[in-house]
Amino acid sequence: MSSKKRVPIISIVGRQNVGKSTLFNALLKKKLAITEDYPGVTRDVLRARVLNPEKGLDFILCDTPGLDIERPESLEEAVLENAFRQVAESDLVVFLLDLKEVTSYDSRLIDKFRKDPELNQIPVLYCVNKVDHPEDEEDLDSFYKMGLSEILPISAIGRRNLPLLLEKIAFLLPNAKRRIQTDEEGELPSLEDFSLAIVGKPNAGKSSLLNALCGYDRAVVSEVAGTTRDSVDTTVTFDGKKIRITDTAGIRRKSDKAEALEFYSYKRTQKTIQSSDVVIHLLDALKGFGEFDKKIVGMLQEEGKPFLLAVNKWDAVENKDNNSFKDYQERLYSRFPLLKEIQIVTLSAKEKQRIHKMMEMTIDLASRAKRKISTSELNQSLRAWMAEAGRSFSANRPPKMLYCTQVSISPFHLILFVNHVDYFKSNLLSFIKKKLTEKYNLKGIPIRLELRSDRK
């Protein structure tokens, strides 16, 4: 009987600014982590799956924050605790050192991996980064003097020796500290049923919500707005569904490129939305729905992502009564009428109130977002609605729908071949979207109508 191992976890560790995020990106062959040429940029633990069939590799790669915060404040203590928790769960550690600078903390950290009972059973692969040229390998003596028997020289930015690094990982993984569990029938690990992104303004409680869903502190939580700079993801199982959840950096505004961290966080959040199946837009009940929330909804609409509105910190709203939620909804609708088409749930991430209801709504939304409608049914429905509309939405030039077909489910995208694009005004398109939403239960799912005609 064949067996298939669970996906092992490999963590990149080291002090600040040795190139961990650059190596993370280089092994993924895409820019997922923030990389800036100064320390302290990565705060949360990033995870991504690496598949390399040629080398028989399949593992979860983790990028951790720098571990050399000498006198941490409360936020940094949480960062370090989160990072070391991740490292302790790893099956293999890639310990990154800097050719250009060896510090006393490098030795102390190496010593910690040798002596700490939670860490000393984990295989460690020591890599010296920034070895950009063959002649640089002559400068490795100082690392051997630290008692390292084997050192792998690499250049993350130049991709030098990265194939060799993968070969070493393949060599070391069979001796990982954990006996990786196998399933009875040797099947590949099941993929997620869907992916879920949590977005919103800074300090709305996104990381607290992720932690509440996980049951432990997966992301660093602080009252300091903007603590999460990277998109942090994890996988949970809820009502039999395997869901990958990503907590994104808070969106304040479309940042100027001069503010590098804000700019990259914004772009990464945008990419997370693009790659997610469903999105939770989290609001702070005490702050309400602002201009930046409008921009977030606009982004979600533009990307065609199914989403619901979750109003966090509802427990902190004072003087609530039976009409509080209805009154809150009406205020939201007055600010942004589009929200009438979006499902809304109140919750408290801190107190774990109505988290279960929110997840039920999310699963339902993900299921409905996969709706495929036959071309014949669509055409029958559209023609009936056009007849119902009659001349209500036209002047002297009546619009005519010739043919309609669905071309994708995410976004829910229909192409309408019409007699003339200009005859289909915005109020008619809104009428069609409303009918589609009602008939096919598409509330919370943006509908994209693309008009085509030989006459533009």
Image (cartoon, rainbow, N blue to C red):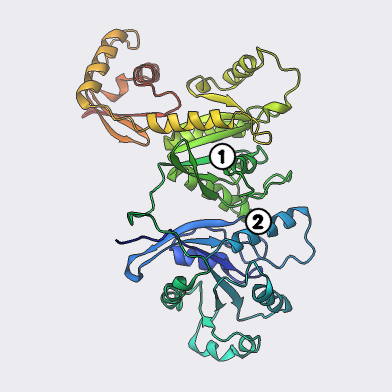
Q: Position of residue 215 (x, y in %)?
A: 61, 43
Most foreground residue, 19 or 67: 67
Q: Amino acid at mark 1?
A: Val
Q: Position of residue 4 (x, y in %)?
A: 36, 60
Question: Could you say whether the residue bearing mark 1 is in a helix, strand or loop?
Answer: strand
For mark 1, what is the residue?
199
Which residue occupies the foreground of this view, 188 or 431?
Answer: 188
Q: Residue drawn 65% across and 12% down?
A: 323
Under mark 2, the amino acid is Asn
Residue name at image x 57 percent, y 87 percent: 149
Q: Residues within 10 Å of mark 2 (few under 14, many from 20)?
A: many
- The quadrant of the picture occupied by the N terminus is bottom left
For discs 1 and 2, the disc positioned in front in the rendered view: 2
Q: CA distance from mark 1 to mark 2?
A: 21 Å
Q: Describe residue 73's horizontal placement relative to residue 271 as left or right.
A: right
Residue 82's label in the rendered image is 2
Quadrant into which the C terminus falls: top left
Is residue 316 shown above or below 226? above
Locate residue 29 relative to residue 295 in the image: left or right. left
- Sequence-wise first label, 1 or 2: 2
Kind of element beneath mark 2: helix
